[in-house]
Image: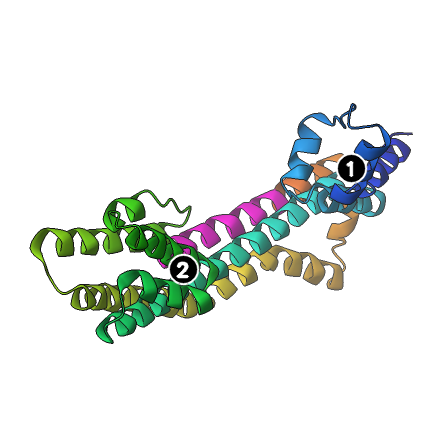
Amino acid sequence: MLTSSLSIAGLALLGWPGPPARARLRNLTGGTSRIRGGAMFALVRKGYPVSSVVAACLVGWLLLGPGGGLAAAFAAATGNHRWRTRRKLRATLAAQEGMAEAIRALALELRAGAHPAQAAASVAVDAHPPAARTMRTIAGTAGLGGDVGVALGQVGSPDAGLAAAHEQLAHAWRLVRAHGLPLAEVVSAVRVCLDQQAKFSGKVHAQLAGPRTSALILAGLPALGVLLGEAMGAEPMAVLLTNPVGQVLLAVGVALACAGVLWSARLTERLVRS
């Protein structure tokens, strides 16, 4: 009975209406009713992969018992978290490289004698999206005769690297405004600093590939030990699947392995972002 209920709940989450379906439902009801799903619906709206975790839990429960269901849910949640985190990290590195390239192009335009507004607008056309937004801010503010340093200081960014780039550009514009320094030279100095930071982050990310792989291998060693035990005739799977204590150990063991993977990943990614 419990397994059937969980299966129905998992299928309901897998078939949860997406944004187009919700829009059609609102149109059918005249926009007067709202779909309410509590905390679970809020998580789905934010893109959290609840469906895959629930599906993994159901499959693990059916094949390996309650402990296997929890273990599968822990493994699925960890895999989803790692995938989303690595995708975000790659986007951050690409944004940093794009910002350094955009500032390099801006310095070249300024050296050629272009007005800051025209130079920034020209660079924004082919720049990486986050860098293009920064360049459009510079172009709009400089074109209206405003304080570019203040405008850049108000441009928020969730990424620490891009926030540092905005701060350095704002400081450069304040120096030019206060002391009359050549703008092209100051922007070039900022470009050199950002370029070095982007290259350093990429180099550290590449060098940490070995430790990341080692952490994954260490996390998988308990599974290898179970397989070796089966090959030797010790039958550890029978203990894990049929014994209540074994079910608890299965869930706790997988949870600890997942925690180790997440902790090691956090340590390596902190080095890349620093």
**Residue at the spot of label 2:** 131
**Which residue appears at 26% of the width and 67% of the height?**
191
- State which region is magenta: 254-274
Expressed as whole percent of the image width and height from the top left, the position of residue 223 reads 66, 57
Expressed as whole percent of the image width and height from the top left, the position of residue 158 reads 42, 46
Expressed as whole percent of the image width and height from the top left, the position of residue 11 reads 85, 40
The vertical placement of 204 against 38, above or below, is below
Nearer to us in this view, 126 or 171: 126
For disc 1, the neighbor class at 10 Å (few under 14, some 14 to 19, many from 20) is: some
Q: Within the magenta stretch, is there residue 48?
A: no
Expressed as whole percent of the image width and height from the top left, the position of residue 92 reads 44, 58
For residue 126, side relative to residue 233 (left or right): left
For residue 214, side relative to residue 188 (left or right): right
Q: Is residue 147 visible?
A: yes
Viewport quadrant of the C terminus: bottom left
The three-letter amino acid code for the residue at tag 2 is Ala
Tell me the quarter of the picture where residue 38 sits. Answer: top right
